[in-house]
Amino acid sequence: MSGKIRRLAYLTALSIVALVPSCVSNPAYAQKSATQINVKVGYVNLAMIKASTPAGAQSEELTHRAEAFLKASVEESNKRLQAAITEKKSEEDIKKLKADLQTQINAKQQAYAELVTSSQEEARQRIQQAADQVAKEKGLDLIVDGAGVLAGGQKLMDNGVDITQDVVKRLTPSAATASASSASPAKETTK
């Protein structure tokens, strides 16, 4: 029995020794070294864009309204529950009322969460589309949120292009209309 084990160990060691050189010389297993490429980088202040544009402002407003509505709903539910306790309803009725109120609150929370998420996603997509358009116009390869840079931020700010205001202008209808009307001469109409 010990001969079989030794032979198995020998074959295993032999196969490992045979595989090691192929793994080391195979480029698929080798680590890639860093390559230097030239990339034109732009950055935005995403928080400023959200605060300065209708889509971002609407999303924030919806979030605040949803929070206020849910807070009012919770307060109203607590009043109803307290009234039931004050009226000395049965423990079973109070448990049922509590469960019903909790179910209603949970349904409202879920509905508002979906609405807010949808609104935020729509605003994010609009901002991304505007940033993509501005990046193409300015010949930029990469756009990042300046607030989200964890390292190397100063180099980015010194060498990158801030396109925040360009994105805000693209997303703000009144600014786009004003710039379009100032760019083209006004036509006179005759009757």
Image (cartoon, rainbow, N blue to C red):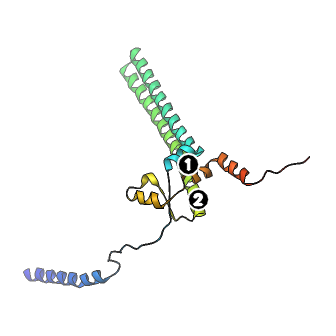
Mark on residue 123?
Answer: 1
Q: Residue at x 35, y 78 (%)?
A: 28
Mark on residue 28?
Answer: none
Residue 14 coordinates in the image, percent (x, y): 19, 84
Q: Is residue 97 visible?
A: yes
| Image quadrant in which you'd find residue 133 | bottom right
Mark 1 to mark 2 CA distance (whole Å): 17 Å
Q: Residues within 10 Å of mark 2 (few under 14, many from 20)?
A: some
Residue 56 coordinates in the image, percent (x, y): 55, 45
Q: Is residue 141 above or below residue 17?
A: above
Q: Secondary structure at mark 2?
A: helix
The three-letter amino acid code for the residue at tag 2 is Val
Q: Residue at x 41, y 30 (%)?
A: 99
Q: Residue at x 50, y 50 (%)?
A: 46
Nearer the observer, 126 or 151: 151
Q: Secondary structure at mark 1?
A: helix
User: Is residue 186 found left or right of 127 in the rendered image?
Assistant: right
Residue 182 coordinates in the image, percent (x, y): 72, 51
Labels 1, 2: front one: 2
The three-letter amino acid code for the residue at tag 1 is Ala
User: Is residue 74 found left or right of 129 in the rendered image?
Assistant: left
User: Is residue 182 found left or right of 26 in the rendered image?
Assistant: right
Q: Earlier in the sequence, mark 1 or mark 2?
A: 1
Q: Is residue 21 above or below residue 171?
A: below
Q: Quadrant of the N terminus?
A: bottom left
Q: Is residue 1 visible?
A: no
Q: Is residue 141 above or below residue 183?
A: below
Mark on residue 134?
Answer: 2
